[in-house]
Amino acid sequence: MIDLRLSESELEARRDHLVGFIRETAEAAGTDQAVLGLSGGIDSTLTAYLAVEALGEANLRGLVMPGEVSREDNMSDAEWVAQELGIPYDVFEINPIVNEFLDTYSEAEDDRLAVGNARARTRAVLNYLVANHEGSLVLGTGNRSEALVGYFTKYGDGAVDCHPLGNLYKQQVRQLAAHVGVPEELVEKPATAGLWAGQTDEEELGIGYDALDAILALHVDGPLSVAATARELDDVTEEQVRTIRGMVERSQHKRRVPPSPDPLE
Ligand SMILES: Nc1ncnc2c1ncn2[C@@H]1O[C@H](COP(=O)(O)OP(=O)(O)OC[C@H]2O[C@@H]([n+]3cccc(C(=O)O)c3)[C@H](O)[C@@H]2O)[C@@H](O)[C@H]1O
Ligand SMILES: Nc1ncnc2c1ncn2[C@@H]1O[C@H](COP(=O)(O)OP(=O)(O)OP(=O)(O)O)[C@@H](O)[C@H]1O
Ligand SMILES: [Mg+2]
């Protein structure tokens, strides 16, 4: 089994690197302010911890955006993160906004995925409303595992100005979070997109993050063939490696600028 764990010195180097990345990205955009959605999950929690180191607590704004299916414990964890870090934050209820969309186009109201994605896109609109008004950047929270398999909503949680965690696999996000002092119960909490009741990443993806990360590291980012990857990983089949590879290929459109036709000859 490939070991993706980072040593203490590697974690410290990553921390410095990502803090520097946030600071330089803001500077290059002519600001020292940023906003991000706080969900109580580990990706937004770690991003907030790093952003406070980069910009200072007064320059970061958290948006806690409960919807109809948000779990109360996650929303109270999100508020705890803002309070613990001492960052200003707002609580914006998205339900009335999403309901307006569904009143306008009621055909979609029983479509779990379409409604869930509308929740993520509503949060993106609110992030940019604040960013435009305050002259701040929208910090993304996506990690490499989600980005590669396309496990995010296009123009929803994917609609951001930078991805500080974009080169960390999910298990490395948890490791770095523990390293910077995020409490263990937040580090260990199961990942959920929170787009519909009971949703968890690992159930929807059909694979655990440790196995997913290993397949991505060996086969997608690394040089091993499908067969060699399955041989290397206990409990991973060739079929699973092909499934993940298919997800990576089918989601390419989410990682690219939308195409336009070439100019006429
Ligand atoms: N080949 C192609 N070239 C260009 N565009 C293409 C395309 N195929 C689809 N599309 C477009 O993309 C749309 C589908 O993409 P999208 O709207 O994103 O929808 P989709 O990928 O179907 O759903 C989003 C997935 O991400 C998960 N998610 C969302 C948010 C947060 C998290 C989390 O981890 O917290 C996870 C969610 O649970 C779900 O599994 C299509 O409706 C179409 O407009
Ligand atoms: N209820 C919410 N309030 C504010 N922001 C949210 C909410 N739900 C999702 N988001 C935003 O969407 C991002 C993507 O969600 P995602 O679930 O991938 O990350 P996470 O919740 O931080 O971590 P995890 O994947 O472990 O649940 C979040 O990091 C956060 O910025
Ligand atoms: Mg989440």
Image (cartoon, rainbow, N blue to C red):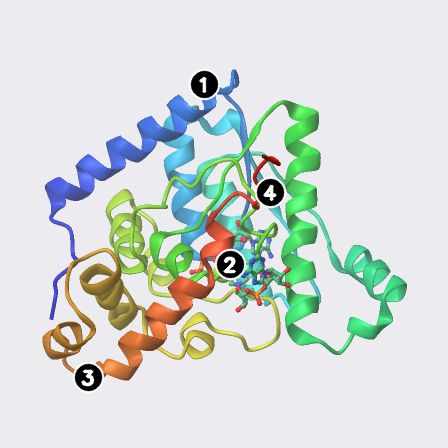
- Going by the picture, which residue comes out furthest to the right? 104
Identify residue for label 3.
235
Q: Secondary structure at mark 3?
A: loop
Residue 58 horizontal side relative to residue 56, left or right = right
Distance, label 3 to label 4, CA atoms, is: 43 Å
**Dividing the image into 4 quarters, which one contains the C terminus?**
top right
Q: Three-letter amino acid code at disc 1? A: Ala
**Dividing the image into 4 quarters, which one contains the N terminus?**
bottom left
Tell me which numbered mark, 1 or 2, is placed earlier along the sequence.
Answer: 1
Q: Please provide percent x and percent y for residue 49.
A: 39, 40
Q: In front: mark 3 or mark 4?
A: 4
Q: Secondary structure at mark 2?
A: loop
Q: In front: mark 2 or mark 4?
A: 4
Identify residue for label 4.
260
Distance, label 1 to label 2, CA atoms, is: 26 Å
Identify residue for label 1.
28
Q: Three-letter amino acid code at disc 2? A: Phe
- Is the Cβ of the residue at disc 3 closer than 8 Å to that at disc 4? no
Identify residue for label 2.
152
Tell me which numbered mark, 4 or 1, is placed earlier along the sequence.
Answer: 1
Distance, label 4 to label 1, CA atoms, is: 28 Å
Tell me which numbered mark, 3 or 4, is placed earlier along the sequence.
Answer: 3
